[in-house]
Amino acid sequence: MTAIGKVSLRDTVFQRGQSKERSKLLVFNHAVLLLLTAFAVIPLAVLTFNSLKTELEIGQNPLGPPKQIIIENFAEAWDKGDFATTMRNSVIYVVATITAELILGGLAAYALARKRPPGSDLLMLYFLVASTIPVWMYIVPLFVQMRTMKMLGTFHGLIVIYIAGNAPLTIFLLRSYMIDLPRELEDAARVDGANEFQVLTRIVLPLTKPGFLTVGLVVGLGVWNEYTLALTFVHDPNRFPVTTSFAKFVDRFDTNWALTSAGAIIILFPVMVLFLALQRQFIEGLAEGGIKT
Amino acid sequence: MSIHSKIVPYLFLLPAVLLLLIFNLWPTAATLHQSLHAQSFISNKLVFVGLENFERILKDPIFWKSVQVTLIFSILVNPIQIVLALMLALLANQRVRGIALFRSIYLLPVAVSINVTTVVWGLMLDSDSGLINGILATLSLPKQPFLTAPSHALWSIILLATWKGVPLWALFFLAGLQGIPESVIEAAKIDGANRRQIFRHITLPLLRAVLLFVLVADTVANFLLIAPVYSLTQGGPQLSTNLIMFETYRRGFVYNDLSTAAAMLWVMLIFVLLVVLFQAFVLRRRD
């Protein structure tokens, strides 16, 4: 009897102590969460505020919320930045790159994850190293090459550069998503007379959808935000992407922070919407693939 | 059948390999060729000079100064980013109210392009009208020359890189954390393990692969950082933010010395290769 009483007493004391400690911890966690959120959000909030102010108000009140909301900034930034053209172009660059990248990368990743032909290890090492080299490290020889191939200033020229630049990481990541799939399904399909291509498209592809989504998102984000290569390989304003619209504000209308901020928001908006919508699948995709070599 | 099945994998690899051969491997190799040559002033042709470009770099105090800046930068920025990212991921992995909203918010900087990031932080760090100096002023603290003093500028670059980098790496940590089965943690709790013990003996070992990946990817990414330096400080003041990548850019495109720039690129490439091989080696040994 007494023994049981002692034990239960100690248990309740222990639990009470733990729950006190727990609530203290929760307060601390919330405080840290709040701090980190503020760190992430404040620059973006300032940007949003400034996009809604007059240039005059930014001078007097560079940080706080706008006294009067000037929505016209967006219309003006849209026109001055020629966003109608650049937005269309960026969508072309992003969609074309993602599509080609996933087909090309999917095929290669499948071969490396499943078939492992002789030379696979060497290829993997090359992809691993190549994925860390930014394109502009070899931008001068690439420029010469593009000129010889008569691909300078074309849509497909820039798209090809984006595909090649992202291919090593894409293949590397897609392979890590495919390598752990159970083989039984594929074998069953083969017994039923499916060829390699059908096995890939009907069996492997549906099972690795989160992986493809994640890689597509990473590649798409990179292309949407890319600036240096676009400026180097495209010279016709009719083919410029959105990032060049933004650069125009910073260079030419140096003093107009209202338009610069509005321009930044215009570029950010579509990405943020997409990003928030896909965030959940994105994290799940990363979790499923893991980072395996 | 057997010949067919031997060829098919290579057919699958062919498009990617062909593309990379033309638009990645060949131009990278061309920079090696460039690094072993010098531009002749008379004929504008390339003359073979062997390792002269490499020797010149190694004797150049400005190069060594940029190596020093890069080392200091790396030693500071990588641990700061990784510790904050891990903290962020652990917090975001809890089941508290509003966590989904928090996850969406803290991820936002990932989607912001480096150009926009640089402009926004340029505004925030402005010596006269910047947000941070505004806050300091209301606390009656002196204004700080964030981008214009050699003692401050590198820290400003670190701040900016951290803002953009932490959510990205936290994303990878969060993915890793969500891959840890709930049952393992529950079992440890039943055995009486406290939070610190669970983190030290369960979470951290299970995150090893992710941690190693982030460590290497973060190191390489920061090593190659250039955009904020380019737009905010141009390597200054007094070369205090002259990171090696920016020094390479200056050689190649400001001073038009492509051969020396190419040689520098290869010095950096060898460094990156060593880091990557280290990762591959450590990961393989674990398996």
Image (cartoon, coloured by chain):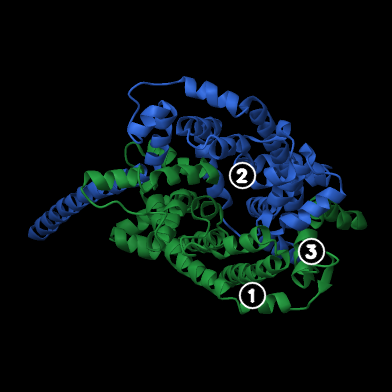
Chain colours: A blue, B green
Of all residues shown, which one is farthest toward the front? Answer: B42
Q: Amino acid at mark 3?
A: Ala
Residue highlighted by disc 3: B30
Q: Amino acid at mark 2?
A: Gly
Whether residues under marks 1 and 3 lie with C-beta atoms below 8 angstroms apart, the answer is: no
Identify the mark nearer the N-term, 1 or 3: 3
Whole-Å distance between the Cαs marked 1 and 2?
A: 33 Å
Locate residue A52, reporting x and y percent.
Answer: 42, 26
Residue A260: tell me if it is visible.
Answer: yes
Whether residues under marks 1 and 2 lie with C-beta atoms below 8 angstroms apart, the answer is: no
Q: Which mark, by number, is residue B57?
A: 1
B13 to the left or right of A280 = right
At mark 3, the secondary structure is helix
A118 to the left or right of A279 = right
Whole-Å distance between the Cαs marked 2 and 3?
A: 25 Å
Residue A186: tell me if it is visible.
Answer: no
